Image (spheres, rainbow, N blue to C red):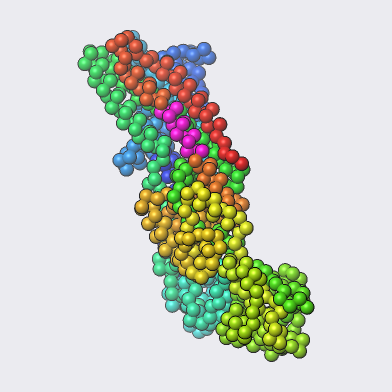
Amino acid sequence: MSHEHHSHEGMDHSQHHGAHEEMDHSMHHGNFKQKFWLSLALAIPILFISPMMGVDLPFQFQFPGSEWLVLILATILFIYGGQPFLSGAKMELKDKNPAMMTLISMGITVAYLYSLYAFVINTFTHQHVMDFFWELASLIVIMLLGHWIEMNAVANAGDALKKLAELLPDEVIRIKQNGEQETVSLQMVHEGDVLVVRAGDKMPTDGVIEKGTSIVDEAAVTGESRGVVKQVDDRVIGGSVNGDGTLQIRVTGTGESGYLAKVMEMVRKAQAEKSKLEALSDKVAKGLFYIALAVGLIAFIVWLILGDLPLALERMVTVFIIACPHALGLAIPLVVARSTSIAAKNGLLLKNRMALENGHHVDKVLLDKTGTLTEGSFSVTGVDVIDTNYSIEEILKYIGALEVSANHPIAKGIMNYIKEQNVSFYEATDEMNITGVGLQGIVNNQQVKIVNGKELARLGLDVSKETIQKYQEQGNTISYLLIEEKIIGLIALGDQVKPEAKAFISSLKERGIEPVMLTGDNKEAAENVARYLGITNFQGGLLPEDKEAIVADFTRQGQRIVMVGDGINDAPSLARATVGVAIGAGTDVALDSADVVLTNSNPEDILRFLDLAKQTRRKMVQNLWWGAGYNLLAIPLAAGILAPIGIVLSPAVGAVLMSLSTIIVALNAMTLTIKK
């Protein structure tokens, strides 16, 4: 079997979407940490020796040859510490989309080259030209620090595509033409091969059953909460889990044609398209880049016309360096660090900080049913006594006597429950399956039946509406116990709705957000749960591509969509949505495709995320105003716009303003809170 579709080369797996996140593409977290500390070690001597924009600070000193030491350290720092910014700028310019990386690169490149020019003039002539080595060092270190803070705060995004590939076993049992079995690598399997899938194993490929029967758990793959009975000629999906029967399957889908391969391709495409979303800070940086470039060039031309080339050059360089976003570089990371800390205390794991920017205003919350709104397992939800001469334990003893020999999902759910209750069931004789009705047999010399609601109505027997209403509302399957044609009790099974789900749906509606349920489960189950929760917009029987198409359609209409799910079938939708939210108890694939993980698997935590996103966005905007406001004020002053009236911003004043705006940004980020 070809595993080429499992190759990750050339794929954009990034869960970080801003262009200023380009560093993440080229550096592992550990390498980045090392780069910051080594850059800091290089920067400290520069900060102690080189003047700040021409002004000697109280703690600074020089010694013979110190200018050469600064030059050497600054050159290493520019090449080593500046590498992620220069690489990011290269990619931004290649995409014709200059943003934060380009703005930073412009500043550090101009600072280095002009300082190199100043060094040559100062060392080999009798003139003095102000250098910017101090600004170069401080800018690189602050930018690296800001990015490290953000990387530390936001959990490393997992590789959903890798997790999908890991769902398939490495080795399989193949039947040779002479009937013997052999263990081979999955890569050696081809369409038409016959494989043996033992009880509890995962289906290695898509296929058709040639021998055996079993109950297959497809919940993680399709969203169907109930185990599916599979027999000869039925299709199976790679990645689903075989139950207690041994199967022989003929391979129908490998490599690119397999179900999981198609899901992987959808996840890859969705992540690649979503990565084009532009961060708010990048939009601001893009504007500042164009403003600084224009103002710097205009300043150079004007001062050159006035006949002062050295001053014209110095003004232009000062504009470019002052435009460098010291405060802007910390504005977002500090807010992200604060908000991720708050999120963790509220049951939220933030895997992508863009979720905070994009979640501040939401039009629709799209919800998977199984495992998200429900518990995700097909199990007994209640046992009721109809004939008070019998106890619940007695009812379970009779039911267990017949169900123990049955092989279907309802029987499995019932027997698991009886075992949990430590009930020893009676023995039955003459057991028989009644097609479309249920089971019957002789227990304790009495005719005992387990039947469905249709058979109950056919027999003219009746159960009060109050008794069964609570089960019907949640779409449960109800089986009735009859002894000698008399109703003794009932047992209900289903995927139980989470107790907090109803209040959560009501809260969404109160906020003006429309809840939409999308499930791979059957339409009847979907309708029952939707009606019970008060969801009017719902669809059932959906495949992963159906869910993803619905999400894509909403986003194309300009709507902001939060998708919530927990299974493999939700992965493409989670990757495609404006914000993907995974239930913490879900599959690794879903968790890795999402932007946010609900660690407590409680849907009500989504409300806390929406509140946090709103507050985070507000703080981000405030900080960007403080950060960019400094630049917008300082750039024209540095260019000399007030020179006609005798006011020219000195580089030293520019540096003080820069430091002040950075402090304000840091303090403002710390005031971020949300209501409990």
| Numbered marks: total | 0
| Looking at the image, residue 373 lies above or below residue 382 | above
Q: Is residue 298 left or right of residue 456?
A: left
Residue appearing at x 65%, y 74% in the figure = 464
| Looking at the image, residue 226 lies above or below residue 639 | below
The residue at the far left in this view is 305
Residue 618 locus on image (x, y percent): 48, 36
Residue appearing at x 28%, y 11% in the figure = 644
In the image, residue 248 lies in the stretch drawn in magenta: no
Residue 673 locus on image (x, y percent): 57, 36
The magenta segment is 615-628
For the residue pair 408 and 81, the one nearer the viewer reads as 408
Residue appearing at x 59%, y 39% in the figure = 675
Residue 609 in view, yes or no: yes
Residue 391 locus on image (x, y percent): 77, 74
Residue appearing at x 56%, y 83% in the figure = 436
In the image, residue 621 lies in the stretch drawn in magenta: yes
Residue 182 in view, yes or no: no
- Quarter containing the C terminus: top right
Q: Is residue 453 left or right of residue 105?
A: right
- Quarter containing the N terminus: bottom left
Quarter where residue 608 is shown = top right
Quarter where residue 553 is shown = bottom left
Q: Main secondary structure of the magenta part?
A: helix
Quarter where residue 277 is shown = top left
Residue 654 locus on image (x, y percent): 41, 18
